[in-house]
Image: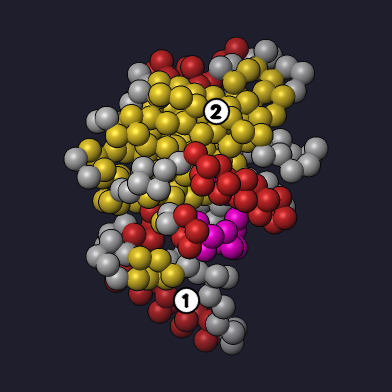
Amino acid sequence: MSVIRVVSYNIHKGRSATGTRESFAELRLGLYGLRPDLLFLQELQGRNEQRISLNAQHESLGAALCMHTAYGCNAVRSHTDHGNALLSRFPILQHENQDISDHRLEQRGLLHAVIEIEEVPVHCMVVHLGLFAGSRSRQVAALVERIRRLVPDDEPMLIAGDFNDWHNRLAPLFVQQLGLYEVFAIAPHNDSEPRLLRNSVKRWRNTLLHLPQPRPLAQKVHELGNNGAARMTPPPRTFPAAFPWLRLDRIYQRGFAVRKARVLQGLPWRQISDHAPLFAELELP
């Protein structure tokens, strides 16, 4: 049995939430304190010829955290490039970056790596989907095709990243076609009473203001809980980091038990990037 600590994070190219200053040193220190076993990173710069402090960010983080690295370059500019990266404490057996760009305005890639945890191959995929719904649907179709072609049904899998899917419309496909579950849907919940209190306060406020009750999040997913029960759970809000409102980031898993899952909020995270990072503790039987 192995317990692994997983982080998914859009790091905004190593710049602060507003983009006005460098935050990569703070990012490196913050991640060091989390002691991650797997890092799924998006908007990471593999090359920056103008600022050496922001160059080869996967290599810098890998050296600081003593982790193996795999980088998938997606967007190439004259002096910089950026993409997705996987950092792992476990050996990376192989990796490949698949171009899933849907149009010229957005360069997107799917980084697929196979790591080994106690002689068990685990497929890890880092994604950053497009801003348009049609693009996301086609990119997910490419992801599904790759999984069906290259990932055996009995091998564990993790897919994490920035899905840009604020309406949560892609989740049913992952659940129904691939048997993947978003970690917050099956993590133990210990905050039911505070949530009930917040909902009661919200209903009371809306009544006083004569506002209609908000409709449920579009297409909440009927997912299986860790105790065998099913519950309707939307993914967490992660953007913008200072006041999270949109549900953009996800960690999906197959073959693991989820011990905990949370969004890392407050300092220093709200100043490091425009996204809040996701943290999950998973158990591989």
| Quadrant of the rendered image containing residue 231 | bottom left
Q: Which residue is label 2 attached to? A: 96
> Which image quarter holds the C terminus?
top left
Asked whether, in this view, residue 151 is left or right of residue 169, the answer is left
- Amino acid at pointer 1: Lys
Residue 142 visible in image:
yes
110 shown above or below 54 = below
Picture coordinates of residue 91, whole percent (x, y)? 35, 23
| Quadrant of the rendered image containing residue 134 | bottom right
Picture coordinates of residue 53, whole percent (x, y)? 56, 15
Specify few, some or many for label 2: CA neighbours under 10 Å numbering under 14, 14-19, or 20 or more: some
263 shown above or below 60 = below
Q: Which residue is drawn at 42% across and 37% down?
A: 123
Asked whether, in this view, residue 245 is left or right of residue 63, the answer is right
- Magenta extent: 162-174
Q: Which residue is label 1 attached to? A: 202
Callout 1 secondary element: helix
Distance (Cα) linking label 1 and label 2 = 47 Å
| Quadrant of the rendered image containing residue 30 | top left
188 and 33: which one is in front? 188
- Amino acid at pointer 2: Glu
Residue 241 visible in image:
no
Disc number placed over residue 20 in the picture, else none: none
Q: Residue at x 50, y 59 (%)?
A: 177
Q: Residue at x 48, y 62 (%)?
A: 176
179 and 134: which one is in front? 179
- Whether the magenta-drawn stretch holds residue 102 is answered as no
- Whether the magenta-drawn stretch holds residue 170 is answered as yes
Specify few, some or many for label 1: CA neighbours under 10 Å numbering under 14, 14-19, or 20 or more: some
